[in-house]
Amino acid sequence: MDIITAPSYEAMSEAAANQIIDLVKLNPHSVLGLATGGTPTKMYELLIKDHLAHHTSYKNVTSFNLDEYAGLKKDHPNSYFSYMNQTLFMHLDIQQQHTFIPNGIAESLEKECARYDQLLQDMGPIDLQVLGLGENGHIGFNEPGTSFESETHIVRLTESTRHANARFFGSMDEVPTHAVTMGIKSIMKAKEILLLVSGKNKKNALERLLDGPVSEDFPASILKKHPKVKIIADKSAYSRT
Ligand code: GLP
């Protein structure tokens, strides 16, 4: 794993956005793996800014999102479907039929997981997978204890993850208890992984990732086994010299 430190959240976001822009320019048919949450929002803003200023085109890009809450309608303001549309997709020329997000309100979530894996298989592999890091080491919504062999599956969210995400909802009660997420194995199939880490609340998780063993107790630790991972961390999350 390579680690790069950025002096600020903005600088981290810029480095990440530039990596995506370079990739899309090099291969306009790139398959991107995208994440939600607070960490990548500035990066998305910078992609939009670049698209408007320099016309980088996403017309032929395909995207797969990592995860979605179970039980939230697509137009719910906190669904990841809404997040992605408002934060990114509606501002780019990406074609909606090329953007994939698990359907958290599918009649059968088991069938939805199988459908998503099939899509990943048919249209993958993902060229560049963007990841955020949960305070407990989760990636996507793969909570501690998730099998490294997992593909897309339904998860019960831990209280700490629900708590961390409650800031986006009116109250803790409104945070869904379950989600659908790409599994660890699905994430590891990406050709390249970009892990973004920002803020002092991620400091412990980043330290554990760098210094700790590879263990299912800490899902992000599997990234040590991937041949091409870049971590971009801002100063508040990583202060080693
Ligand atoms: C959330 C999401 C992840 C995200 C992570 C960190 O629960 N499911 O995809 O990367 O946790 O979120 P944040 O960037 O808001 O800290």
Image (cartoon, rainbow, N blue to C red):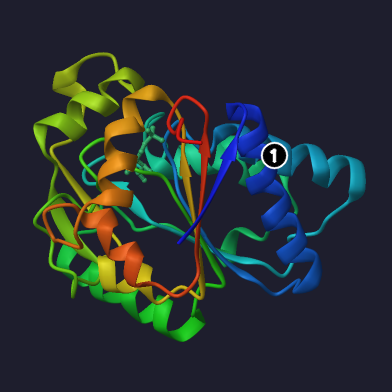
Q: Which of 15 and 212 is in front in this view?
A: 212
Quarter in which the N terminus is drawn? bottom left
Residue 120 visible in this rendered orientation of the protein: yes
Residue at point 21% right, 14% down? 171
Q: Mark 1 points at which residue?
A: 14
Q: Where is residue 93 in the image (x, y as percent from the top left)?
A: 75, 54
Q: Residue furthest top?
A: 170
Give the residue furthest to the front: 241
Residue at screen point 25% across, 75% down = 114
Question: Label 1 is placed on what type of residue?
Answer: Glu
Q: Is residue 122 left or right of residue 44?
A: left
Task: Judge whether residue 139 can be spotted in this image.
Answer: no
Assign ligand 1 to one image quadrant. Answer: top left
Residue 84 lies, in percent from the top left, at: 52, 43
Q: Where is residue 76 in the image (x, y as percent from the top left)?
A: 37, 32
- Residue under the point 60% across and 26% down: 8
Is 19 above or below relative to 147? above
